[in-house]
Amino acid sequence: MGGDLFHWERVWTLKFSAWIALGFLGARALANRATAGRLEAYRAKRGIKVSVDKLQEEIWLVACGAVLSALSGCLLAYGPTFARCNLFDTSECYSNVGSSDVPQEIALYYLTEVGWYLSLILKSVVGVGRFDSFVMEFHHVVTLALVIWSYATGFTRVGVLTFFVFNQSNPLLHLSKLVNYTLGAEGSLNLIAFTAVYFVSRIVLLPAVVIRSTLLDLPGAVTPEEWSEAVVYTWYTTNALLLALWALNVWWLGPIVRVIARTAARKEVKDDVITVEDTSPAGKKES
């Protein structure tokens, strides 16, 4: 492998993510202002009982989630360094760990993702988004820590693969919420589609591809000296963070299944059941 494992100078380059986060927050503020009037009129016309800020939240997350999903997919499909680091072959996900250089396309993608997660953490603080629950904030913080750790230690290829696995269900989740707000039980097919993608990507592929690779492939990709001197520490840290994220997603599967059952029974659905991030019923009038 060669070279040092820890590239802490890379962390300093992530400062540019702060500007990207500001860009996301600024764009969100402009989008909120541009859509508020139209969404209020649409809400009144259709008799939608949730607030405009909820509709804006889901529209924004659908749009940005779809873009990030497409970016990670294109990087895996067409990136020159991912021929043997993908869902079907992870044999070369760690061949660049000792290199001090990060391919430009990977560096730009990491900056974008770090900026995105910073904006999610800060959106309610600056007043352009809704407050998330403690569990969701914890999820954002753990994800951000894992992203920065993988960037500093050179595990950027498997990092992009992890992003791809996580990103596939995000836009479908928020599209399902948006349809639930506007159509109620009539939009249950979107929820079923989200649940299928969520289960395959986060419950099955995350441990079967990503965690299996970090647990088993990584030790064999380095020399015994490299393992004992540095790699063993990042092995424990990376897998602990990945397992924490997987445990959160397994825990969320229960509420998701319950909301499908409630929707099938034509009962009132609370969106905290869908995402564990909101606390008011979808059918209750908000101030």
Image (cartoon, rainbow, N blue to C red):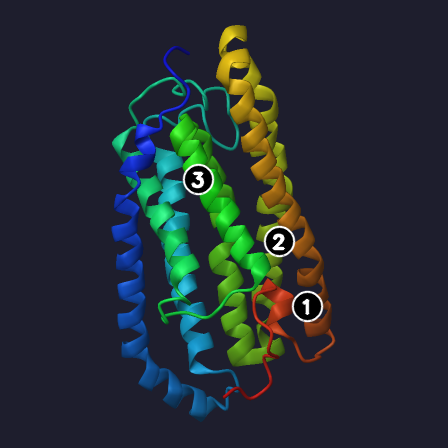
Disc 2 or 3, which lies upstream in sequence?
A: 3
- Disc 2 crowd rating (10 Å Cα; few below 14, some 14-19, many 20+) is few
Residue at (51% x, 83% y) in the render: 50
Q: CA distance from mark 2 to mark 1?
A: 14 Å
- Kindly identify which residue carries mark 2: 196
Give the label on residue 147, or none. 3
- Kindly identify which residue carries mark 1: 259
Disc 2 or 1, which lies upstream in sequence?
A: 2
Q: Are marks 1 and 3 in contact (CB under 8 Å)?
A: no
Query: Residue 48 in the image: x percent, y percent?
Result: 50, 86
- Disc 3 crowd rating (10 Å Cα; few below 14, some 14-19, many 20+) is many
Left or right for 256, reference 48: right
- Callout 3, which amino acid? Val
- Callout 1, which amino acid? Val
**Location of residue 185 by image quarter:** bottom right
- State how many labels appear: 3
Q: CA distance from mark 2 to mark 3?
A: 26 Å
